Amino acid sequence: MGFGAAGAVAAYVGVTVVKGWIGADDSLDVFAIHGLVGVVGSLMTGLLAQSIFLGRQPSFLTELWQW
């Protein structure tokens, strides 16, 4: 539910604010919907895959990518 809410907020802000701010002529709002919501979803996936949210130790692959 958190992913959907954050995606909806990103889509709304993208369509109403960012599109006018960058001066894009995007009649179908493709950048605002797919671009911004995709970025928000990707960032939230990485954030929520942390061990503090999982309640268990991360797997080998997530340990491999830790800084």
Image (cartoon, rainbow, N blue to C red):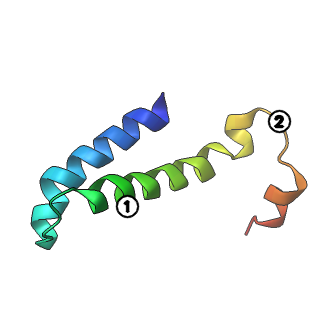
Q: Looking at this view, is 39 or 49 the one in front?
A: 39
Give the residue drawn at x 47%, y 32%.
2
Residue, far front: 28
Give the residue drawn at x 83%, y 36%.
56
Give the residue drawn at x 89%, y 56%.
60
Q: Position of residue 30 (x, y in %)?
A: 29, 59
Residue, far right: 60
Q: Residues within 10 Å of mark 1 (few under 14, many from 20)?
A: some
Q: Secondary structure at mark 2?
A: loop
Q: CA distance from mark 1 to mark 2?
A: 32 Å
Q: Looking at this view, is 38 or 66 the one in front?
A: 38
The residue that disc 1 covers is 35
- Say which mark, if any, is on residue 19: none
Precedes in sequence: disc 1 or disc 2? 1
Q: Is residue 35 left or right of residue 62?
A: left
Q: Amino acid at mark 2?
A: Arg
Q: Position of residue 22 (x, y in %)?
A: 15, 72
Q: Position of residue 46 (x, y in %)?
A: 62, 53
Q: Secondary structure at mark 1?
A: helix
Looking at the rendering, in which quadrant would you find the C terminus?
Answer: bottom right
Where residue 21 sits, quadrant-wise, is bottom left
Q: Please identify, in this view, whether the residue under mark 1 or under mark 2 is nearer the observer.
A: 1
Q: Amino acid at mark 1?
A: Gly
- Say which mark, if any, is on residue 56: 2
Depicted 55 relative to depicted 21: above or below: above
